[in-house]
Image (cartoon, grey):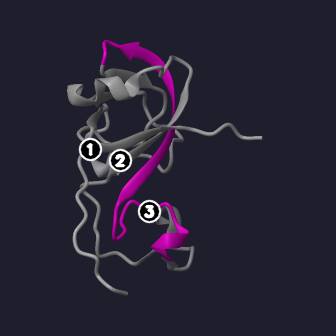
Amino acid sequence: MDDPGPYTLRPIGVVRSPLRAVADAPNQAEGAPKALIEIDPAFADALHRIEEGDELLVLTWLHLADRDVRETHPIGDTSIPLTGVFRTRSPDRPNPIGVHRVTVTAIEGPTSLRVDALEAIDGTPVIDVKVALRRP
């Protein structure tokens, strides 16, 4: 594969959560605490029309992930055979992008969103927010 060169990824915000360590983060959103997403004021207008009750996909950069991992035991269960990370939701992967489906529970000021269960730890960079498509 030809190397097109580096890509620039600019965080647009940060997660504020009671989760302080990777070991504290649950698998997926099951048992995850509520969190606050703080968006950089430069992107305040990008939040226009987001409302309480909206379902969003929050994309994060899992900054503490091990980018050298290629295989893992899914959900940390060693009884499950090693599996390629592209077949798992492991945070440890070549490009550690987290995908989190959340519901907005409150809007605080022009740049802060309270959301329900979010398994990202405090300080995790947010790289994008997208409206979640409704399931049929």
Vertical placement of 98 versus 104: above or below?
Answer: below
Where residue 1 appears, as percent x and y from the top left, is 37, 87
Neighbor class of circle 1 (other Cα within 10 Å; few <14, some 14-19, many 20+) is many
Residue sitting farthest toward the top: 109
Pointers 2 and 1 in contact (C-beta within 8 Å) = yes
On screen, residue 72 versus residue 5, left or right, reads right
- Distance of mark 3 from mark 2, alpha carbons? 13 Å
Tag on residue 125?
1
Amino acid at pointer 2: Thr
Residue 29 seen in this snapshot: yes
**Which residue appears at 22% of the width and 29% of the height?**
42
Q: Quadrant of residue 72?
A: bottom left
Tag on residue 60?
2
Where residue 77 appears, as percent x and y from the top left, is 51, 67
Amino acid at pointer 1: Pro
Span highlighted in magenta in the image: 84-110
Q: What element carries label 3?
A: loop
Which residue is more in the foreground, 124 or 121?
Answer: 124
Task: First in sequence, mark 3 or 2: give its number.
Answer: 2
On screen, residue 129 versus residue 5, left or right, reads right
Magenta stretch containing residue 58, yes or no? no
Amino acid at pointer 3: Ser
- Distance of mark 1 from mark 3, alpha carbons? 17 Å
